[in-house]
Amino acid sequence: MAQHNELGKKGEQLAVDFLIENGYNIIERNYRFDKAEVDIIAKQKDTLAIIEVKTRSSKDFGNPQDFVKPKQIKNLVKAVDEYVTVNDLDVEVRFDIIAIVKEKKGYKIEHLEDAFYHF
């Protein structure tokens, strides 16, 4: 497996652990619809949090959250709309990014809530 894939998998697991520690219930991982893959669908109270995980080995090329592109956001929104419709959910939906950067001794995790509205 390529090193960046291993880092991505590690990042997703760190994000799941982080969310659970902060009171989220993990509903789905790697949900796919059409051209989109939603990394994590989690629930906290009456809110469905759609979480895109971005993991980087350094900030040399920018912050991890800077790598979420408009087309990806459009595909994620479409996938989540399908998910909510198919599962007949009546919840608030929020799009978050968890940005993870590998550091010398571990990882720095930043949870950006309502991230897509800041683009």
Image (cartoon, helix red, strand yellow):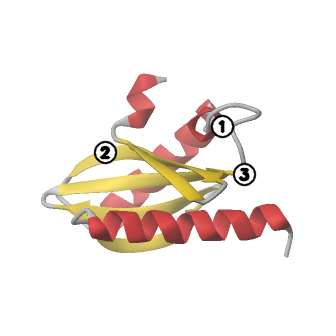
- On screen, residue 60 versus residue 110, left or right, reads right
The quadrant holding residue 44 is bottom left
The one nearer the camera, 16 or 68, is 16
Residue 18 seen: yes
Count of all numbered marks drawn on residues in the image: 3
Above or below 59: residue 56: below
The residue beneath circle 1 is: 67
For residue 92, which numbered disc appears in the image?
none
Q: Are marks 3 and 1 in contact (CB under 8 Å)?
A: no
Q: Earlier in the sequence, mark 2 or mark 3?
A: 3
Determine whether the residue tagged by mark 1 lies in a helix, strand or loop. helix
The one nearer the camera, 106 or 55, is 106
Above or below 73: residue 83: below
Residue 15 lies, in percent from the top left, at: 46, 63
For residue 57, which numbered disc appears in the image?
3
Say few, some or many: other residues with alpha carbon within 10 Å of mark 3 (under 14 / 14 to 19 / 20 or more): some
Residue kind at label 1, given as amino acid type = Phe
Residue 66 lies, in percent from the top left, at: 61, 32
Determine whether the residue tagged by mark 2 lies in a helix, strand or loop. strand
Residue 6 lies, in percent from the top left, at: 74, 70
User: Most extreme residue toward the right, as rendered?
Assistant: 2
The alpha-carbon separation of the residues under discs 2 and 3 comes to 27 Å
Residue drawn where x is 34% and y is 73% of the image: 27
For residue 94, which numbered disc appears in the image?
2
Residue kind at label 3, given as amino acid type = Ser
User: Most extreme residue toward the left, as rendered?
Assistant: 45
Q: Are marks 2 and 3 in contact (CB under 8 Å)?
A: no
Residue 31 seen: no
